[in-house]
Amino acid sequence: MLKSGKKEVSDLSLALQELMRTIRSCEICWDFSDHNPCAICSNKKRDITTIAVVAEPQDVQALEKIGSYTGVYHILRGTLSADMDKQTSSVKINELFKRIQSNPVKEIILALNPNMDGETTMMYFESEIKRKFPTVIVSRLARGLPTGSELQYADEITLENALKSRTVLK
Ligand SMILES: [Zn+2]
């Protein structure tokens, strides 16, 4: 970047400033967007009774690439950590519970990365949602995603199969 000269650096700096100025949080799904609510949450064709819970905004892009998911999302912006010392309080957990409480939610799809922190988070939500909202179906993506992998790097076919044959947690 430094080699490329001052002009590019200052262009980039302006672009970043512009991004910081226009970027918002969607206060429904907690995705980053230039609109609040974001394009997905304000799309009347999306099924608000099905919410896919993901860790990061880039996971939304991975699932949107499949093109067949019609539900909405909830971006946690992190995960619960198996290591409690590393836990951050900014994870949007209560926001999800509030959302389930005030909307006609039928199914929560836990679509977190199949690694330690993802598993910890899914187990937590599975038990909490069942306890707080016994009528809501809780499901998770089918096995098939390699353990330890990240959703955003999964190919579309693997991801689509994992979504289609998701398992309902009983
Ligand atoms: Zn949104």
Image (spheres, rainbow, N blue to C red):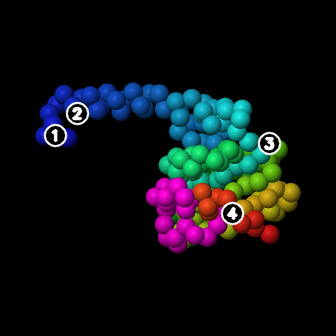
Q: Is residue 93 above or below residue 12?
A: below
Q: Verify CB contact (< 8 Å) between mark 1 and mark 2.
A: yes
**Mark 4 sits on what residue?**
166
Q: CA distance from mark 4 to mark 3?
A: 22 Å
Amino acid type, mark 3: Asn
Give the residue type at disc 1.
Leu
The label nearer to you, 4 versus 2, is 4
Residue 103 disc label? 3
N-terminal of the two: label 4 or label 2?
Answer: 2
Q: Which mark is residue 9?
A: 2
Residue at image position (77%, 54%) is 107
Q: Residue at x 14, y 33 (%)?
A: 5
Q: Position of residue 37 (x, y in %)?
A: 63, 32
Q: Residue at x 69, y 57 (%)?
A: 109
Tell me which label, 2 or 3, sits earlier in the chain: 2
Q: Earlier in the sequence, mark 1 or mark 2?
A: 1
Among the two numbered marks 4 and 3 on one chain, the one whose residue lies closer to the N terminus: 3
Which amino acid type is shown beneath numbered disc 4?
Arg
Q: Which residues are magenta?
A: 141-159
State yes or no: residue 155 in magenta: yes
- Around disc 1, counting alpha carbons within 10 Å, would you say few (fewer than 14), some (14 to 19), or many (20 or more)? few
Q: Dot 4 lies on which element?
A: loop
